């Protein structure tokens, strides 16, 4: 593509050259384009895309399919699905926001007439899309390679819960990303992600962990998301309640957002 | 637009970072269509002034307005473009995509090709941003600043790190943009740059305005010469001469800053015909700033 075509196609992305005031439709356009450009940027980052997609798929393949010969497929789907959807939220917000803050990209975006929420909207869309992709990949494996059987409503409920379940982790990532340096962010996020996954019983069933660790697991958001997923695939007994876990995740997300708002105010004053 | 004439205003603004006062009771009005240059040494408060005007820093006291409203109001930002000194664009996008992304935030942006052309990077449209050199990146930042077709451009040290040719090209692009009636504020620590572009120069030092006026007037006040020579004339007696801004002695070697080297030299040579190792050069701008600061303190 020569450079004239390149700029013309770039222009085509800006659809409102015509004169006239700023309309609601234009604002919607700004939100959607920002999401599109962030997605485009993210897809070009193999260091984000590959681990985010491959780790849950690999884990599921080893432990859910090969190790257990396809038995307990639904149980492992809930566990590795939870493990999978944590990553786009934690890394997509935690690491990316820390790096962009440190490099002054956030300041640049604040100078440009981009609504603050549009920036975060773009990041959330990106995280949700990755979560959706992970859930689809794992579900296809579960359906074809394991004993997992769910009604289509079951698949929808599980997918919806897991995709929405990435949101508390977006909030946690954001709270971390607004405080830590870009260089420290990947290590810190991994230090949150991996121990939390283990302690919430995503790798080894929680009943196999020492009793004292089991007691503490109720403090972890990943534990609660996993309980929701397990209930939805029918691996948690019929009487298991969803609501306490949903409420825990909502409260957790709100606390993280409150921390993030403080961090954002701090960032706003250079 | 507020009171109709002023596009941006800082009113008795002070900004402290802990114990450091970056901007000290500064009042500044920017008129539509003018090119204003903020000139000053490192740490003078130029960047903080820009950050206050753009709403990136919150004033400790005083107020800042852009087009009569708060600088971080979206309606003000839609009329403003800026190039920040400290931003490193971490993008996986290509140059044209990146400009399209930022242009898309504005109601009536420039065409991407036009923005690239102003910045002299049309040929790099398809290059990934990550593969740009430092100077090319700087010019991309310039393209981003103007891609929204803003009425008001802020440029914080736009030519830092550019080679001479690129610097001249950017100057000429700025003149073209200014000819459309845009208001431009740029910071620099090159007197030459302020002189080449600005209608008005505001000289900052330690967060205060120490001089303000047309470039030629400022230039005559800060265009000091530096005389270095070996002489038996004492530093103290040179310091007494009119027009001498400062004298530093190192044994028999003197280092004199003055606005009128001819008369100082005449006096020196008259007092010491054996004067040797004579050298007359342009003074460092720091000397000029110090001289202006002293001038202002005397006046106060």
Image (spheres, rainbow, N blue to C red):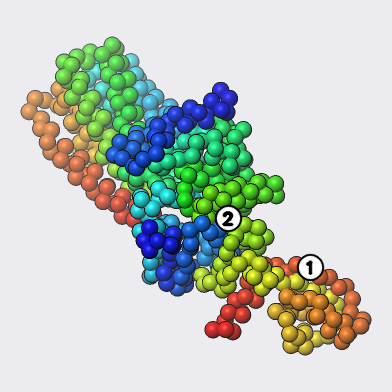
Where residue A57 sits: x, y (%)? 35, 22
**Residue designated by label 2:** B157
The quarter of the picture where residue A165 lies is top left
Where residue A250 sits: x, y (%)? 19, 41
> Disc 1: which chain?
B
Where residue B4 sits: x, y (%)? 40, 61
Is the residue marked by circle 2 packed among few (<14), some (14-19), or many (20+) residues within 10 Å? some
Please state, as top left, top right, bottom left or bottom right, where the C terminus of chain A lies in the image. bottom left
In the image, what residue occupies the spot 40% across and 35% down?
A18
Is residue A90 placed above or below B199 in the rendered structure?
above
Mark 1: secondary structure: strand
Mark 2: secondary structure: loop
Residue that protrudes farthest toward the top in the picture = A144
Front residue of this view, candidates B195 and B83: B195
In the image, what residue occupies the spot 51% across and 60% down?
B47
Front residue of this view, candidates B79 and A218: B79
Residue that protrudes farthest toward the left in the picture = A239
**Residue designated by label 1:** B281
Q: Are marks 2 and 1 on the same chain?
A: yes
């Amino acid at each position: 593509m020569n450079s004239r075509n390149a700029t013309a196609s770039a222009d085509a992305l800006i659809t409102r050259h015509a004169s006239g005031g700023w309309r609601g439709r234009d604002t919607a356009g700004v939100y959607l384009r920002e999401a599109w450009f962030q997605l485009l940027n993210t897809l070009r980052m193999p260091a984000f895309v590959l681990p985010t997609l491959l780790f849950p798929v690999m884990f599921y393949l080893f432990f859910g399919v090969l190790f257990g010969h396809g038995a307990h497929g639904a149980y492992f789907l809930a566990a590795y699905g939870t493990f999978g959807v944590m990553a786009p939220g934690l890394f997509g917000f935690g690491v990316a926001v820390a790096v962009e803050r440190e490099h002054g990209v956030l300041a640049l975006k604040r100078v440009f007439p981009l609504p603050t929420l549009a920036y975060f909207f773009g990041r959330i869309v990106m995280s949700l899309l990755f979560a959706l992709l992970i859930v689809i990949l794992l579900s296809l494996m579960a359906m074809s390679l394991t004993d997992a059987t769910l009604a289509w409503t079951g698949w929808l409920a599980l997918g919806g819960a897991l995709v929405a379940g990435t949101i508390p982790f977006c909030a946690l990532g954001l709270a971390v990303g607004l405080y830590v340096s870009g260089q420290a962010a990947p290590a810190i996020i991994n230090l949150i992600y991996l121990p939390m996954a283990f302690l919430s019983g995503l790798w080894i069933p929680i009943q196999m962990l020492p009793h004292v660790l089991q007691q503490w697991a109720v403090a972890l958001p990943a534990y609660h998301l996993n309980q929701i997923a397990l209930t939805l695939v029918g691996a948690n007994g019929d009487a298991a309640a969803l609501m306490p876990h949903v409420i825990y995740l909502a409260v957790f997300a709100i606390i993280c957002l409150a921390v993030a708002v403080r961090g954002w105010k701090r960032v706003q004053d250079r | 637009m507020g009171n109709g004439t002023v596009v941006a205003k800082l009113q008795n603004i002070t900004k402290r970072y802990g114990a450091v006062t970056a901007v000290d009771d500064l009042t500044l009005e920017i008129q539509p269509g003018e090119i204003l240059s903020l000139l000053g040494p490192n740490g003078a408060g130029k960047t903080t002034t820009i950050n206050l005007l753009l709403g990136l820093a919150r004033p400790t006291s005083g107020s800042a307005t852009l087009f009569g409203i708060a600088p971080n109001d979206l309606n003000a930002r839609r009329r403003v473009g800026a190039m920040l000194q400290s931003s490193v664009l971490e993008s996986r996008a290509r140059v044209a995509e990146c400009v399209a992304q930022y242009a898309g935030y504005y109601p009536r942006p420039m065409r991407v090709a036009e923005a690239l052309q102003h910045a002299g990077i049309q040929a790099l449209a398809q290059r990934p941003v990550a593969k740009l050199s430092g100077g090319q990146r700087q010019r991309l930042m310039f393209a981003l600043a103007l891609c929204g077709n803003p009425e008001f451009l802020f440029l914080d040290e736009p030519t830092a790190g550019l080679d001479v040719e690129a610097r001249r090209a950017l100057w000429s692009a700025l003149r073209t943009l200014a000819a459309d009636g845009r208001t431009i504020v740029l910071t620099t620590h090159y007197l030459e740059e302020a002189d080449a572009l600005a209608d008005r120069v505001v000289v900052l030092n330690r967060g205060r305005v120490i001089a303000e006026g047309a470039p030629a007037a400022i230039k005559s006040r800060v265009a000091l010469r530096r005389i270095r020579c070996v002489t038996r004339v004492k530093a103290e007696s040179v310091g007494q001469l009119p027009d001498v801004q400062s004298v530093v002695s190192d044994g028999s070697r003197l280092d004199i800053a003055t606005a009128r080297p001819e008369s100082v030299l005449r006096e020196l040579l008259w007092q010491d015909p054996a004067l040797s190792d004579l050298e007359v050069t342009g003074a460092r701008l720091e000397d000029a700033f110090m001289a202006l600061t002293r001038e202002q303190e005397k006046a106060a």
